[in-house]
Image (tube, grey):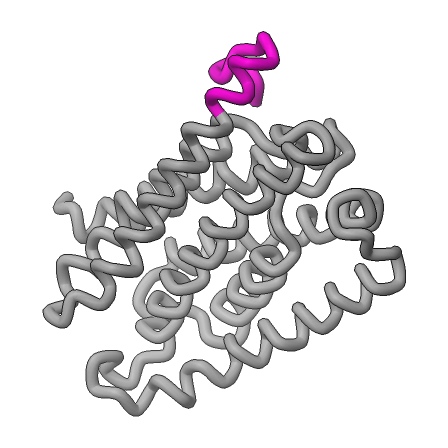
Amino acid sequence: MDFNTLAPLISGVAWTITYFGIVYRIFKDKTPGMPVAALCLNFAWEITYSVIYPPASSVALIIINVIWMIFDALIVVGTLLYGPKDYQQRFGINRSIFYFMFVIGIVASFGVMLLGPNFFGSMTIFHHNSFEVAKFIALIQNLVMSILFVSQFYSRKRFGNPIAGQSFMVATAKWIGTPLTVGLLQAVADPTGFMSVIVGLTLICDTWYMLVIYREIIAQGLSPFKRI
């Protein structure tokens, strides 16, 4: 099995571990584990590319996407339960504004996912394949997500516990899940160098996030390897 075949499988397992860890920490710590904007994009991506535009070439990818969709649904539930308190503390956003923001985020994210294949699909680089567009969108939103996770850490550090809803396992699995697997494939395959910039920035942010989570857990007298 070559890296082209292995990378998506490793990525699928790594992101499944990431989602499991986030779900576990959300309900244990009663704190959202994923920034709202990242969650909206993720949830919309998984529903769109599991149900509406599934990858025709791979049953394994469909199964992985469905598993991710189920985990993301649990993250949505936890975020709706515990998000208002967290966002009130960090940003002064009341419950009504939080839910309004979440609805707008979901609608906008579905707009991006549903219309993206039509917008990008005519470009020859995507071979008129909606799932090739999906992979491109996923890498862009992964960079956004990686930036948001770092931002979430520092905003929580000012007002409370920055590792609430998080763990070193989550950070490490996320680090493996994109820039070191499917992201690397896309960067190597892109002759323009554009995807190398996107994937490289994602790797920097994910490494940064992994290191600050590790150091914070150690500073709190906990073990990064025992805290799921």
132 falls in the magenta region: no
Whether residue 157 can be seen here: yes
Q: Position of residue 226 (x, y in %)?
A: 53, 13
Whether residue 24 can be seen here: no
177 lies left or right of 160: left
Q: Tally the marks.
A: 0
Residue found farthest to the front: 158
The answer to whether residue 188 is above or below residue 11 is below
Residue 108, quarter of the rendered image: bottom right
52 lies left or right of 206: right
144 lies left or right of 78: left
What segment carries the magenta color?
214-228
Q: Nearer the viewer, residue 115 or 66?
A: 115
Residue at the image position 43 percent from the left and 41 percent from the top = 174
Main secondary structure found in the magenta portion: loop
The answer to whether residue 32 is above or below residue 102 is above
Q: Nearer the viewer, residue 27 or 93?
A: 93
220 falls in the magenta region: yes
Residue found farthest to the top: 221
User: Where does the N terminus fall, quadrant-wise?
Assistant: top left
Q: Position of residue 22 (x, y in %)?
A: 60, 37
Q: Position of residue 28 (x, y in %)?
A: 73, 27
User: Where does the C terminus fall, quadrant-wise?
Assistant: top right
Q: Position of residue 221 (x, y in %)?
A: 58, 8
The answer to whether residue 162 is above or below residue 106 is above
Residue at the image position 62 percent from the left and 62 percent from the top = 40
Residue at the image position 73 percent from the left and 35 percent from the top = 159
